[in-house]
């Protein structure tokens, strides 16, 4: 079908789509729904986080599915995902499938966990602004969780170092700031709950729960490594891993340069770049070969790869130097217990040298790292967060703002505080 004909068919279908959504809303309003155990959907951008969160909520007894446009076959498996748009409604024109997915979801799900990309029609000119009113009319609740490129408005980023890293990896996004800002502001205004984590300081203006990170892992899939390498860089090499996707954003060039400097000093060290490989292979390397993981050196905080390293029981290095980002989550969330090792491009050589030459320090940090992930980032902890969020959007809970408060919050005090050899994420000499 020619492009102009596909476009014509699509826009002729749009009024039918809107009428169908309104009809579904009337149908649902006339019926009665029990929202004690809501049906959840995570989409429509294919983020691995969605897979983990959905898994956590299924384990907690919810009907929970991922429904995404596609999946990234180079790093993910099809079995990681539930519903894929391309596989639905065989024979239907591809341009109409997002509309069908939206309508179908209105009948199936109660709570929509989305990014600023929206839900299937989030980038459709003339339709994306209808998402919130249609979902609300149908009695649906929306939870907004950003992932990065959907919400980084470059002119709002407070760290010029982070801004440079973004420009190094994603220069084209600087030309789309108006569109990104419009969608970010739209969901900050219309979502029933907003869970932005550490990104919240950069232009959100709203969060309902302040969590260090909502990310989680199935720790049955990520058992702690039993490996205790005695390597100290003198007799045997210390293996350092780094995933160099988004190189400018992660500071990969500084990682490579730091390792080369240490080699020139005479230390035995091996750098393994985890690039374009399946997650199963990443897991195998982190658990069987790695002594240290350098996650990233530019962005303040950590991502899923950092959790994978901590779950494996090895020290993980990330940049935690900017107190404007870190202080709020130390003070009002659980980051004071986090055993990530902080380093910047300027301090990485020194930090690595201390970890390379002190295997016992690596083991102690790795042990507390595993304990931290078990306490705050396993499936049970994710279920705790999102059950509270579901209760909040259904008005069964008044507030989430102190959910992880180190004094007022229940969860941080359910078990002993995580203690590591670090002081504010720095190695103590």
Image (spheres, helix red, strand yellow):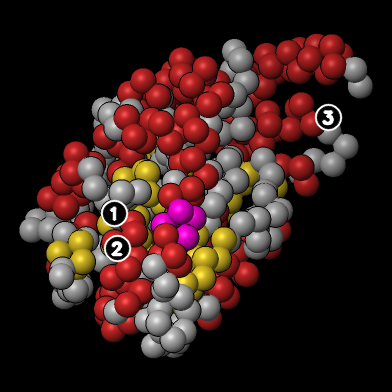
Which quadrant of the view contains residue 107? top right
CA neighbours of label 3 inside 10 A, class few (<14), some (14 to 19), many (20+): few
Q: Position of residue 302 (x, y in %)?
A: 37, 53
Element carrying mark 2: helix
User: Which residue has dot 3 on it?
Assistant: 93
Residue plotted at (42% across, 20% down): 181
Q: In this view, does 202 lie to the left or right of 46?
A: left
User: Which residue has dot 2 on it?
Assistant: 351
Q: Where is residue 69 in the image (x, y as percent from the top left)?
A: 67, 40
- What distance separates the C-alpha of mark 1 from that of mark 3? 54 Å
The residue furthest right is 1
Q: Does the magenta stretch include residue 259?
A: yes
User: Which residue has dot 1 on it?
Assistant: 347
Q: Give the range drawn in magenta.
A: 256-260
Magenta span main SS: helix
Residue plotted at (37% across, 44% down): 298
Q: Is residue 170 left or right of residue 353?
A: right
């Amino acid at each position: 079908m020619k492009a102009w004909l596909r476009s014509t068919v699509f826009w002729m279908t749009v009024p039918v789509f809107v009428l169908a959504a309104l009809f579904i809303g009337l149908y649902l309003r006339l019926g009665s729904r029990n929202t004690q155990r809501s049906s959840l959907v995570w989409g429509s951008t294919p983020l691995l986080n969605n897979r983990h969160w959905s898994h956590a909520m299924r384990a907690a007894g919810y009907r929970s599915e991922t429904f995404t446009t596609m999946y990234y076959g180079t790093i993910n498996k099809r079995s990681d995902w539930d519903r894929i748009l391309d596989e639905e409604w065989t024979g239907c024109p591809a341009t109409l499938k997002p509309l069908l997915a939206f309508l179908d979801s209105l009948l199936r799900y109660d709570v929509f966990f989305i990014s600023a990309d929206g839900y299937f029609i989030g980038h459709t000119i003339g339709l994306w602004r209808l998402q919130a009113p249609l979902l609300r009319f149908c009695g649906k609740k929306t939870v907004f969780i950003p992932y990065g490129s959907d919400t980084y408005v470059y002119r709002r980023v407070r760290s010029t170092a982070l801004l440079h890293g973004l420009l190094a990896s994603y220069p084209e996004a600087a030309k789309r700031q108006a569109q990104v800002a419009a969608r970010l502001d739209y969901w900050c205004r219309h979502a029933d709950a907003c869970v932005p984590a550490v990104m919240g300081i950069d232009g959100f203006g709203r969060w309902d729960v302040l969590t260090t990170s909502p990310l989680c892992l199935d720790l049955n899939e990520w058992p702690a490594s039993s490996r205790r390498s005695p390597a100290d860089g003198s007799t045997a090499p210390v293996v350092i891993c780094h995933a160099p996707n988004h190189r400018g954003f992660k500071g990969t060039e500084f990682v490579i340069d730091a390792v080369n400097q240490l080699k020139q000093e005479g230390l035995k060290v091996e750098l393994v770049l985890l690039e374009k490989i399946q997650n199963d292979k990443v897991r195998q390397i982190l658990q069987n070969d790695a002594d240290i993981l350098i996650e990233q050196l530019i962005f303040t905080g950590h991502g899923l790869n950092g959790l994978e390293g901590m779950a494996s029981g090895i020290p993980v290095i990330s940049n935690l130097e900017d107190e404007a980002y870190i202080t709020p989550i130390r003070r009002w969330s659980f980051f004071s217990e986090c055993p990530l090792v902080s380093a910047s491009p300027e301090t990485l050589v020194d930090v690595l040298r201390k970890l390379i030459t002190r295997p016992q320090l690596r083991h102690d940090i790795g042990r507390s790292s595993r304990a931290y992930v078990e306490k705050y980032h396993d499936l049970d902890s994710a279920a705790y967060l999102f059950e509270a969020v579901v209760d909040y959007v259904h008005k069964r809970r008044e507030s989430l703002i102190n959910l992880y408060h180190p004094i007022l919050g229940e969860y941080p005090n359910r078990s002993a505080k995580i203690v590591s050899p670090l002081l504010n994420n720095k190695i103590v000499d």
